[in-house]
Amino acid sequence: MDNQKHKYLIDSIKTIISRARSLTVRSVNALQVASNYLVGERIVEFEQGGAERAEYGKALLKDLAVELAIEFGRGYSQSNLEYMRKFYLIYSQSLNEKSQTVSGKLVPDKSIEKSQIASGKLGLIHESSEDALKVSNALSAQFPLSWSHYVFLMSIKQKTERAFYEIEAANENWSLRELKRQFDSSLFERLALSRDKGKVRKLAQKGHVIESPEDAVKDPYVLEFLGLDEKLKYTESELETAIIDKLEYFLLELGKGFLFEARQKRFTFDEDHYYVDLVFYNRLLRCYTLIDLKIGELKHQDLGQMQMYVNYYDRYVKLDYEEPTIGIIICKKNKEALVEITLPKESNIHASEYQLYLPSKEDLKKQLKEVERDWDSQHEK
């Protein structure tokens, strides 16, 4: 290995790390991610100037890890350096696409050209501290999540799926734990299966956008966090209590915009008392959402009851500027044919199944591929 080139590599990476640690910026996490991106960039650049053998890369990272650990301690192990290298390879393409499509948004300071980020000319050892700050801030704006988030996201192989979770994690301020839970519950696949091909593309470009009642409904709802054993008997009241006890998790599963209002909300009509299991309000859709829980299969009486609840709220509770009430029956077994024959087409009532275990991602991916094939065959016709 060329000693002069090797020394330059070490010095340039040390400069990146030192400046990242000394610069005062608002987000420490964002600066760390930007620094890791630059380190990955430098490693890739150096590799491209040398051998392309896997053994060469491993030896390079091993030597780097030893030398960086002496000065910076933990955080620059061989495995972490491999993540940084991978991070650059994955996200440099995304930054390049952004620089071509989002004019003026990639780099906030005009003195730092967009092409600098896209072409890999960042953070050179000869840059001034002022330029280094501008570049770091520009990169930080592109990486709103923590490094731990990105390490997890890099494990998602499909580009569209990874983009979806990245957007949602940033928009909804998910913790790493919440991100992992949404991934494990196959949120992307569940949403994609209920959309056409065009809307699936939008999931990867914009995340989960709530524009209609249908966008706010999932099927199935995954309630593994309740800790209930589906093999044991439990009542609807026990299911409801478990949801209230884990309300924060249930709101995460419901999705965007939901605010909890009441449990067993009573209203009186014609001297009779009625009780809605759970009442929420969706601030994005500006409407009430009523949820009824059924531990068995869906029956037509359940649909009729929910229709009455929704009618009452629309006529006596909602304000003029609010949108029509949504009714969701969460049941153990749905009957789509029953829903179709019982309710009018313009009905704002939905029935969805729930399950107490995480779904099989493999099965859902297979279903999604089958649906995509159907879309393609219909388009060909």
Image (cartoon, rainbow, N blue to C red):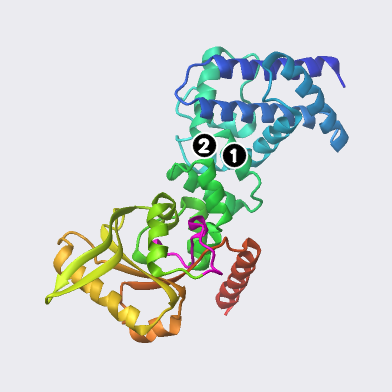
Magenta-colored stretch includes residue 228: yes
- Secondary structure at badge 1 equals helix
State the image quarter where residue 47 is shown.
top right
Q: Which residue is mark 1?
A: 150
Of residues 161 and 176, the one nearer the viewer is 176
**The residue under label 1 is which amino acid type?**
Tyr
Magenta-colored stretch includes residue 355: no
Of residues 100 and 214, the one nearer the viewer is 214
* Image location of residue 97, percent across then percent down: 56, 43
Residue stretch in magenta = 215-232
Q: Say if mark 2 contacts mark 1, CB within 8 Å.
A: yes
Of residues 177 and 169, the one nearer the viewer is 177
Residue at the spot 50% in from the left edge and 52% down from the top edge? 205
Q: Is residue 267 above or below residue 124?
A: below
* Image location of residue 27, percent across then percent down: 47, 26
Q: Is residue 316 visible?
A: yes
**The residue under label 2 is which amino acid type?**
Leu
* Image location of residue 295, percent across then percent down: 44, 72
Of residues 175 and 241, the one nearer the viewer is 241
Question: Which comes sooner in the sequence, label 2 or label 1?
Answer: 2
Mark 2 residue crowding within 10 angstroms, few (<14) / some (14–19) / many (20+): many
Q: Is residue 53 visible?
A: no
* Image location of residue 32, percent across then percent down: 57, 26
Residue at the spot 45% in from the left edge and 81% down from the top edge? 335
- Secondary structure at badge 2 equals loop
Q: Which residue is mark 2?
A: 145
Q: Is residue 222 above or below residue 165?
A: below
